[in-house]
């Protein structure tokens, strides 16, 4: 069975059953789309039984979301949001750059394009996908923004809305254009420049006014 041949986000196929399952599931979803990927074929490629899949997830939908969560989690460095101290821009930059790099890569574009094409037929899949992104990406940013706001470093009425705005400025809008083929993937240098500029604009908008800081 021929599967997608780009190197996996999750690394070469080795290790325990769960690792092999995630590797082969990612390859199958990218090669055949959500609808075309079959659990039986994924199990065969991973060297496990189809029944074993259900020890890890309850459905194909859950398997897809687990692949997404694992890929994003591997790229993120949540500790960077606290390691930078008072360097707010540096903290956001170190946290978001790996996620942007993944989202703007060939694999990230291919995966998002597949999701867009399947979303109308499988609306629950789209909802679970964005729930996965919220858990792995948005939640840490929301929590960090709330801490900065409570400390008086930022003036934010809603950390949830602020996190959504930041992700739209840095990732979401460009990821959509890339998935639709409206532009070519940016170079690493262009990605860093976009991130630096977006964070600067975002922070200027949420910095407390002098009377608020006092």
Image: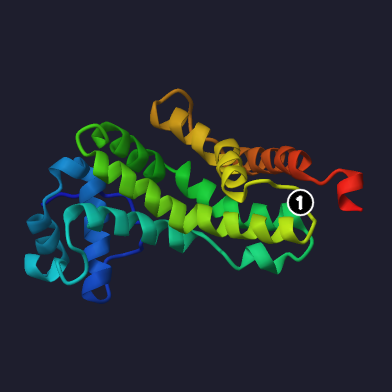
Spot occupied by residue 139 in the image (x, y as percentages of width and height):
52, 57
* Vertical comparison of 149 with 184: above or below: below
Spot occupied by residue 118 in the image (x, y as percentages of width and height):
24, 36
Task: Tell me what residue is drawn at x 64 percent, y 44 percent.
Answer: 192
Instruction: Write down the residue under mark 1.
Output: 154
- Judged left or right of residue 102, residue 116 is left
The answer to which quarter of the image holds residue 209 is top right
Residue situated in front as seen by the camera: 202 or 77: 202
Task: Tell me what residue is drawn at x 34 percent, y 39 percent.
Answer: 110
Task: Tell me what residue is drawn at x 15 percent, y 66 percent.
Answer: 53
* Vertical comparison of 96 with 189: above or below: below
Q: Is residue 49 visible?
A: no
- Judged left or right of residue 60, residue 127 is right
Q: Is residue 68 visible?
A: yes
Residue furthest to the top: 182
Spot occupied by residue 39 in the image (x, y as percentages of width and height):
11, 56
Residue situated in front as seen by the camera: 113 or 128: 128
Spot occupied by residue 117 in the image (x, y as percentages of width and height):
27, 32
- Judged left or right of residue 31, residue 147 is right
Task: Tell me what residue is drawn at x 40 percent, y 44 percent.
Answer: 108
């Amino acid at each position: 069975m021929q599967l997608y041949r780009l190197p996996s986000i999750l690394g070469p196929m080795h290790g325990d059953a769960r690792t092999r399952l995630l590797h082969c599931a990612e390859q199958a979803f990218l090669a055949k789309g959500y609808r075309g990927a079959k659990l039986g074929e994924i199990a065969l490629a991973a060297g496990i039984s189809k029944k074993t899949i259900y020890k890890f997830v309850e459905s194909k939908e859950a398997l897809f979301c687990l692949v997404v969560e694992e890929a994003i989690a591997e790229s993120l460095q949540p500790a960077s949001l606290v390691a930078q101290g008072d360097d707010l821009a540096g903290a956001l930059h170190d946290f978001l750059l790996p996620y942007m790099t993944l989202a703007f890569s060939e694999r990230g574009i291919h995966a998002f394009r597949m999701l867009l094409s399947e979303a109308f037929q499988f609306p629950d899949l789209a909802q679970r996908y964005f729930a996965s992104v919220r858990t792995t990406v948005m939640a840490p940013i929301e929590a960090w923004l709330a801490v900065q706001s409570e400390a008086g470093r930022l003036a934010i009425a809603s950390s949830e809305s602020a996190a959504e705005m930041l992700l739209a400025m840095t990732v979401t809008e460009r990821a959509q254009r890339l998935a639709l083929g409206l532009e070519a993937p940016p170079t690493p240098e262009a990605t860093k420049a976009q991130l630096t500029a977006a964070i600067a604009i975002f922070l200027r908008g949420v910095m407390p006014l002098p009377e608020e800081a006092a």
